[in-house]
Image (cartoon, rainbow, N blue to C red):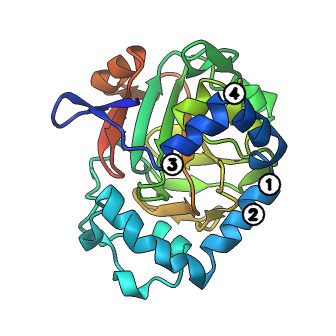
Amino acid sequence: MIKIYNRKTKQYEVEQVAGLSYLKWCYESPIGKSITELLIKKKLFSKLYGSFCDSSTSKKKIRPFIEEFNIDMSLANMKLEEFRNFNDFFARTLNAFARPIAQDRDILISPGDGRLSAFENIDLDKLVQIKGLTYSLKELICDDKVAKEYDGGVCLILRLCPTDYHRFHFVDDGICGETKNIKGKYYSVNPIALERVPKLFCQNKREWCIFKSENFGDIIHIEVGATCVGTIIQSYTPNVKVKKGYEKGYFKFGGSTTILFFKKDTVKIDEEIVHQTSLGYETKVLMGEAIGNKFK
């Protein structure tokens, strides 16, 4: 059972996990763990499933998925019958009113929908994956020189579930550099997997870049792939100025993760989110929602 914190109700909710039985089998049973290591974590498995989700045959999965997880389709730009396949639906865009953006330049917004963990005054060699398991920023981005600049800063981990809106956005006005690609495996990023696979984020496929934001300094923006996320699409144009809330890219099918790193004394995350993280709970957030402020 995975509990997440709801900022609006001030209550904990039990997360409705897509494929819960499958995840438990893959990461908790002896046979499942063996098959995960032999097949499921590998690129071929995710690529094959991704091809299915791109096919017209996968369209029949859309309506049952919407009904099972009570997804509000009134927020989407396309109607159910307009989707050509499951990935069309999964990477759907939302209408202009679905995700209002906090416009104050000193307010930090969430880059996407998901479950947020926030860590302040970070130790670059002991970043928290989940209680008891750590990794280093150097391992995550494979660049020691850049990593050293973020010691004592802030790390935000936004975990997206298959039921979430799967596009990620810029948190401020600024200019984003070229994306660097790091090949890797395709473990699930669900807490069930995070508890059992050491340095999972450093093992999975990932992409990262430096976003030179106008109000929060240079931000490391990382997208981590996962099981059945064979493709991370970067839809932005490098080295061209963007506005706060503009789309940066999107994930195809599967749960995924966006990670942001801020330098020391550039941003202050809402105490409520930091406190819930310290208790071991992720906080439910939506893209454009205020999650912090410029450090003063």
What residue is pinned by disc 2? Answer: 47
- Under circle 4, the secondary element is loop
What residue is pinned by disc 3? Answer: 19
Residue 245 sits above or below residue 10 on the image: below
* Mark 1 or mark 3, earlier in chain: 3
Q: Name the residue type under label 3.
A: Gly
Which numbered disc, 2 or 3, marks the residue closer to the eye? 3
Q: Residue at x 80, y 28 (%)?
A: 144
Q: Name the residue type under label 4.
A: Val
* Mark 4 or mark 3, earlier in chain: 3
Q: Name the residue type under label 1.
A: Lys
Give yes or no for contact between labels 1 and 2 (Cβ–Cβ under 8 Å). yes
Give yes or no for contact between labels 4 and 3 (Cβ–Cβ under 8 Å). no
Give yes or no for contact between labels 1 and 4 (Cβ–Cβ under 8 Å). no
Q: Is residue 57 left or right of residue 136?
A: left
Distance from the alpha carbon under mark 4 to that under mark 3: 18 Å
Q: Is residue 16 left or right of residue 120?
A: left
Residue 43's tag is 1
Location of residue 284 (image quadrant): top left
User: Where is residue 53 shown, x and y percent of the image?
Assistant: 61, 71
**Residues packed near mark 4 inside 10 Å, few (<14), some (14 to 19) or many (20 plus):** some
Q: Residue at x 75, y 63 (%)?
A: 47
